[in-house]
Each structure stands twice: as structure tokens, then as C-alpha cells.
């Protein structure tokens, strides 16, 4: 499933970041978003974009379009 489909408050494990451009993938990896990393969807903005997620104890905001390219399990 994609990160954009994850329910609020649920936790998943990152499987694949391959659908992203290399620049975006590198930025996310620097922030700790690596394969096999646990990610929790904290909440969605009122209009659905961006998503607030927690990775390795750090809260980050990810655009809906990027979340649709991140595969989680």
C-alpha cells in the first residue's frame, strides 16, 4: 500500500522509495526515511495536504504527491 493510503494513527514499515526522483529520495533518506524504517501517520492537514508523519521520533511533513510514491507495509 502507499503511504497516502495509511490511516491516521497507524504505523507501517517503509518498503520502497523507488518511484521518487533521486533528489526527493535523497532528501527523505537524509531525514531518516529509509527502507525497513517504521513510519506513523500522525495527521492530515484539513485539505488533505500535507501529511504529518513521525519517523525515528521526528515529526516531518510530506506532500500528498510524494506520499503516493512511498510504498509501505
Image (tube, rainbow, N blue to C red):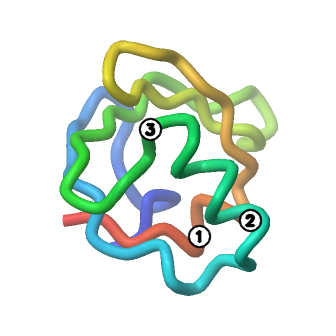
Q: Is residue 20 above or below residue 36?
A: below
Label 2: state its secondary structure.
helix
Q: Is residue 73 left or right of residue 48?
A: left
Q: Is residue 9 left or right of residue 73?
A: right
* Residue 29 coordinates in the image, percent (x, y): 52, 51
User: Could you give the CA–CA distance between mark 1 and mark 2, rounded to whole angstroms?
Assistant: 5 Å
Label 1: state its secondary structure.
loop
Q: Nearer the viewer, residue 51 or 55?
A: 55
- Residue at the (67%, 31%) spot, across then down: 61
Q: Nearer the viewer, mark 1 or mark 3?
A: 3
Q: Is residue 3 above or below residue 19?
A: above
User: Could you give the CA–CA distance between mark 1 and mark 3, rounded to whole angstroms?
Assistant: 18 Å
User: Could you give the CA–CA distance between mark 3 and mark 2, rounded to whole angstroms?
Assistant: 19 Å
- Residue at the (57%, 42%) spot, across then down: 30
Q: Nearer the viewer, residue 52 or 47?
A: 52
Label disc, if present, on residue 65 of the rendered structure: 2
Asked whether the residues under the numbered discs 1 and 2 touch, taking CB atoms below 8 Å apart as contact, a structural biologist would say: yes
Label disc, if present, on residue 68 of the rendered structure: 1
* Circle 3 residue: 32
Q: Is residue 55 above or below residue 5?
A: above
Q: Is residue 16 above or below residue 54?
A: below
Amino acid at each position: 500500500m502507499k503511504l497516502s493510503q495509511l490511516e491516521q494513527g497507524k504505523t507501517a514499515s517503509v518498503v520502497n522509495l523507488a518511484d521518487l526522483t533521486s533528489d526527493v529520495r535523497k532528501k527523505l533518506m537524509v531525514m531518516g526515511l529509509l527502507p525497513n524504517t517504521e513510519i506513523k501517520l500522525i495527521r492530515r492537514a484539513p485539505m488533505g495536504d500535507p501529511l504529518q508523519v513521525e519517523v525515528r521520533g521526528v515529526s516531518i511533513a510530506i506532500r500528498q504527491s510524494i506520499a503516493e510514491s512511498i510504498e509501505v507495509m
